[in-house]
Amino acid sequence: MKKNSFFVTIVIVCALVAAYLIYYLILGNPSHFTDALKTKPKVGDYFGTAYVGGFVVPWLITLSIMVVTFIVERFFSLTKAKGTGNMNAFLLNVEHRLNDGNIDAAIDLCAKQRGTVANIIRAGLESFKKVRTEDRLQAELKLAEVKRTIEEATSVETPLLERNLIGLSTIASIATMVGLFGTVLGMIRAFAAMGAQGAASATELSIGISEALVNTALGILTAVIAIIFYNFFTNKVDTFIYTIDEAALNLVETLNTKFLGKVAA
């Protein structure tokens, strides 16, 4: 948990620094403007238009960078959680080893496969290997110990699958609001300038409105990307959890029937 908090803090700081560099060095490049004060972007120049969108733009860029970072991190982590080989083939091979009565071979397969499911199965197998030779324990108690170990391993592995999803969810919720906040500020500035200067031309008014709406566009785009990938990763995690539950159930039933000589209920 502390490690992930440190990671998130680093992401926020780096994203903020990168966003301001992008805002001032790229969007604020003098080549995008017709004046030295960088208040009049060239016609059709979206970089210049985004720059005059105001101080909210860097914050929206920060959120966008964080979304991209979390997406890349989740892809990497979930790919790693699958292990080194095909998941279905791995589970089938483990079952074959257990049916042959070779627990050590099944544990070796878990060590080679790695990943979330393999770690949980390995924990259950190692626990069973320890309690198997204890004659003082009844079969039900041995299975109970295995189940407890599997539950503990699952409680450790599951948060790793869900890590940073709350970040995507939060950004998806606030990005649009931040964009609207920037738009409102931009509209206030535009109409305040109109009130001070009197009647304004349609061209000047359209430019002011387009500058204000840049914030809304960035906010909506960031929120849409965050929502899409949040739902995508949530579905992936749900599939993982289902696989874990199914593998754990099959493991307990196999141990019960093959090693303890009892028929699973």
Image (spheres, rainbow, N blue to C red):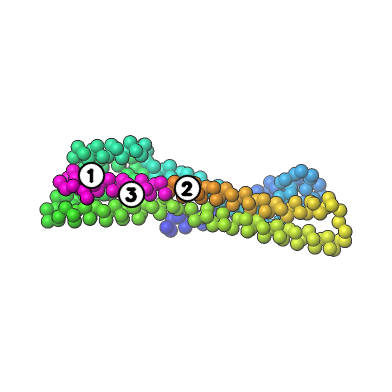
3D distance between C-alphas at marks 1 and 2: 31 Å
Q: Residues within 10 Å of mark 1 (few under 14, many from 20)?
A: some
* 206 sits left or right of 165 in the view: right
User: Which residue occupies the foreground of this view, 1 or 95?
Assistant: 95
- With respect to residue 114, does 196 lie above or below? below
Residue for badge 3: 245
Residue for badge 1: 254
Predominant secondary structure, magenta span: helix
- Looking at the rendered structure, the secondary structure element under dot 2 is helix
Q: Amino acid at mark 2?
A: Phe
Kindly tell me whether residue 105 is visible in this rendering: no
Q: Amino acid at mark 1?
A: Thr
Where residue 239 appears, as percent x and y from the top left, is: 41, 46
Kindly tell me whether residue 257 is visible in this rendering: yes
Q: Are the residues flagged by discs 3 and 2 in contact, CB closer than 8 Å? A: no
Say if the magenta span includes residue 145: no
Q: Which residues are magenta?
A: 238-265
3D distance between C-alphas at marks 3 and 2: 18 Å
